[in-house]
Image: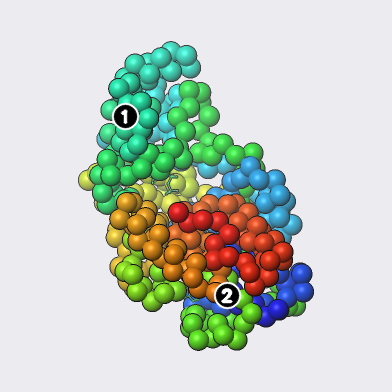
Amino acid sequence: MNILLVGAGLSGAVIGRRLAEAGHTITIIDGRDHIGGNCHTERDTETGVMVHVYGPHIFHTDDEEVWDYVNSYTTFMPYKNRVKTTSEGQVFSLPINLHTINQYYGKTMRPDEARDFIAGIGDSSVQEPQTFEEQAQKFVGPDLYKAFFEGYTIKQWGCSPTELPASILKRLPVRFNYDDNYFFHRFQGMPENGYTPMIEAILDHPSITVHLETWFDATSAADYDHVFYSGPLDGYFGYELGRLGYRTLDFEKFTYQGDYQGCAVMNYGDRDVPYTRITEHKHFSPWEEHEGSVCYKEFSRSCEPEDIPYYPIRQVKEKAQLSEYVALAEKTAGVTFVGRLGTYRYLDMDVTIREAMDTAAMFLKKGKDTPAFVKSPL
Ligand code: FAD
Ligand code: UDP
């Protein structure tokens, strides 16, 4: 069959490759002038540093098949994400661990003591935390919540943590040992030459043709037997039910001679610092040596029509709107909506790849009867 994939990010590349290997003819279009979607990396011409153009991307997964898949297309180097945060004039280690707790309270507690101490200051009146704030108050108490989460979260999401779901914070563990690895997955790493060559290798198949700087036009869909769409769900329907809310990011780039901050990611918990974090890209490739350095100051704000949508907001209003779009999509024949924008969800790279593999498998079984969503966005 002749298949159109909209978007040359991970979703489009993985689905395209699987279907090309099964004998289908694949056309992939992307409106940008490069492949890789938001995982795109490129070397800075001035310093030679590998830059994560759309923000820091660290690969972490428990899914062995996904790990084997990415390793079959590129070499992954060992990489552990060790994030620091600056709050009230001091630098602390994240995620909150025994070092953070002891440093914050000026104590030398052992694991059990710290566990009891935090349990004592956590808000025990909260049974089942519903909001971000309740989750934080219950598990770390008011001081650590204010120092590390409240200000950062207001800057990141532009609203009070009382309006956000607890699930956002559940992504971050609290540890009662000195493990400061941001992630707890079995497999973690960084592609030696960045993500774009990996995605290029996935796309390197004689039955795949990629057209860049080509935005999707609904009339062209008629030329294909099926479309997989990884662009924004609301955009497919010309935003006819309004725009789904996103946060966008502004990156203020600056260069530095030497080592600017000594780590890849420094968060800023204080409300009066306008950015959320500074990323120093050369620390993502510790096996390389560069005298110069490239840093991004990251600012979060509401996404306007001309901006790049980054984080889906998914609060009550957006979820109601989303269900209307889902109903519309389910009535639309010949299109399957995939990926972070097509399903309006925050998806890590490993989950994106897993879902792309499952979507391709579903298409190989059901062909044109593949539903609008292989994974429900609701
Ligand atoms: P995308 O990468 O967004 O690709 C979609 C592509 O479709 C884009 O190239 C776009 O140009 C194109 N497109 C859109 N609309 C159209 C149209 N109408 N016509 C033509 N082309 C179109 N994951 C991790 O695992 N680890 C991390 O550390 C991590 N960090 C992240 C940091 C940030 C700031 C963000 C926002 C995400 C992060 N992620 C991370 C998630 C990761 O970016 C996603 O998993 C991944 O990009 C999803 O791939 P995708 O193909 O679904 O979407
Ligand atoms: N967060 C915070 N302070 C930090 C880091 C994270 O308050 O120093 C909150 C913030 O609301 C963020 C959420 O925890 O959206 C999840 O953190 P994660 O690092 O997973 O953020 P993401 O990768 O989504 O930017």
Local crowd size for mark 1, using a 10 Å CA cut-off: few (<14), some (14–19), many (≥20): many
Q: Kindly tell me whether residue 16 is visible in this rendering.
A: no
Closer to viewer: mark 1 or mark 2: 2
Outermost front residue: 331
- Mark 2, Cα crowd under 10 Å, few <14 / some 14-19 / many 20+, is some
First of labels 1, 2 by sequence position? 1
Distance (Cα) linking label 1 and label 2: 47 Å
Residue topped by disc 1: 137
Q: Amino acid at mark 1?
A: Gln
Image-based side of 227 in relation to 146, left or right: right
| Residue 164 versus residue 224 in the image, above or below | above
Instruction: Name the residue carrying label 2.
Output: 334
SS at badge 2: loop
How far across and down, in percent of the image, does residue 233 sit? 44, 67
On the rendered structure, is 63 left or right of 95?
right
Q: Quadrant of the N terminus?
A: bottom right
Q: Which residue is at 42% across, 31% downward?
A: 96
Position of 350 relative to 15 (above/below): above
Please identify the quarter of the rendering in which residue 371 is found: bottom right
Question: Do we see residue 359 in this rendering?
Answer: yes
Q: Residue at x 57, y 75 (%)?
A: 334
